[in-house]
Amino acid sequence: MAARVTLQTIADRVGVSRMTVSNAFSKPDQLSATMRERILAAAEELGYVGPDPAARALAKGTTGAVGVLFTHSLRFAFTDLVATGFLGAIAEELAPTGLSLTLLTSTDDGDIVPARDVPMDGALVYSCDWTSRAVDFLHRRRLPLVYVDQDPAADIPSVNVDDRGGARAAARHLLDLGHRRIGLLMSGTHGPYGLLDDPGAVDGHSSRQRLLGWLDDLGPAGAELISARQDGTGLEQARWGARLLLDRPDRPTAVLCFSDAVAYGALQVAAELGLDVPGQLSVVGFDDNPLATQVRPRLTTVRQDIAAKGKAAAATLTAAIERAKAGTPAPAEHVLLPTELVIRESSGRLS
């Protein structure tokens, strides 16, 4: 078995001190270019790839990684178009910093609890269920945190979009088209599910803000509301909720949906029931993810800039980490990004 190559092995080969070899990897500005090239060439010849990452992290007091905490399973991060766009923007913003991205579930059973056990320098708390202990674990670790799509807290930086303003614009659009019997198709982590007498029974920052925005205009207009809520935003759940609203004699003439993914389920159910969109039913989503222009008819929706949200979240977190390292706390920054109504073919005037 070949002997383990260490910094001292390379130092002996080149004829320099162990510290000089260490500087070639961790403090290259301390050496001449010629000396560093000699050391790196010797390391490559000996099969040495660099200092042990765990040891280097211990010495520097940093892991070189940041976490993103999800309530959902990690599969959600790779299948939901909004989540994938958000993560891609974070990765792009982090690339120049050298920080890597670690995806965390909010699982808190078993021997390994990611929010408690995974090494990281800070974390983004992304649209998380507050009943999970994962968020509490991150707080107790005193890590720099940034909330995204969460209720802002006075002492924690946050990045949100104007969910309420965007939802208000969507509701006003349907009212301007003459609709007065309007369905609200919502989703959430906790019940109740099904048809709701009280549409206010929602959880989650984005859900609450979008509902408030709809009601800001629908309430004063005296609109007749029919509300349904399903567990999550998956297609089958959305189809279930949409059928509750549409497969009935007093169906609404328009539906406001929590997201474009939910609206897609509503479009499918409308087609199965023989309802023309937008002739007999208008459908409005939220997010303007790529799905909105792939479905037919193309979806009227509220656009949020997912890339801008991801970049703002990453930049806010890296700034918080740097302040923590320097011991220079600053007031928590709260970023609110604009939204915009995008009118396409899925909404039309009530005839």
Image (cartoon, grey):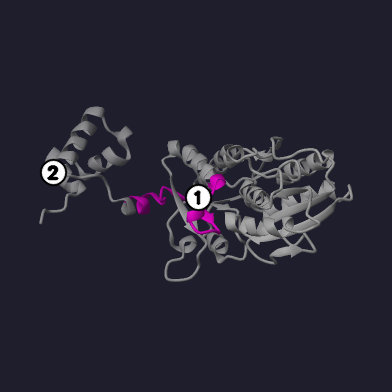
Q: Residue at x 56, y 66 (%)?
A: 133
Q: Is residue 159 left or right of residue 30?
A: right
Q: Is residue 350 left or right of residue 13?
A: right
Query: Can I make out residue 127 in this image?
Result: yes
Q: Quadrant of residue 198?
A: bottom right
Residue density around tag 2, few if under 14, some if 14–19, many if 20 or more, within 10 Å: few
Residue sticking out furthest to the left = 1
Q: Which residues are magenta?
A: 56-83
Q: Is residue 81 magenta?
A: yes
Give how far apart the Cα atoms at labels 2 and 1 are: 52 Å
What residue type is disc 2 on?
Asp
Residue sticking out furthest to the front = 274
Nearest the viewer among 224 and 10 is: 224
What residue type is disc 1 on?
Thr
Q: Quadrant of the N terminus?
A: bottom left
Determine which of the numbered discs, if any, sits on residue 79 in the image: 1
Q: Residue at x 67, y 66 (%)?
A: 191
Kindly identify which residue carries mark 2.
Answer: 12
Residue 73 x/y as whole percent: 50, 59
Q: Residue at x 68, y 52 (%)?
A: 273
Nearest the viewer among 100 and 259 is: 259
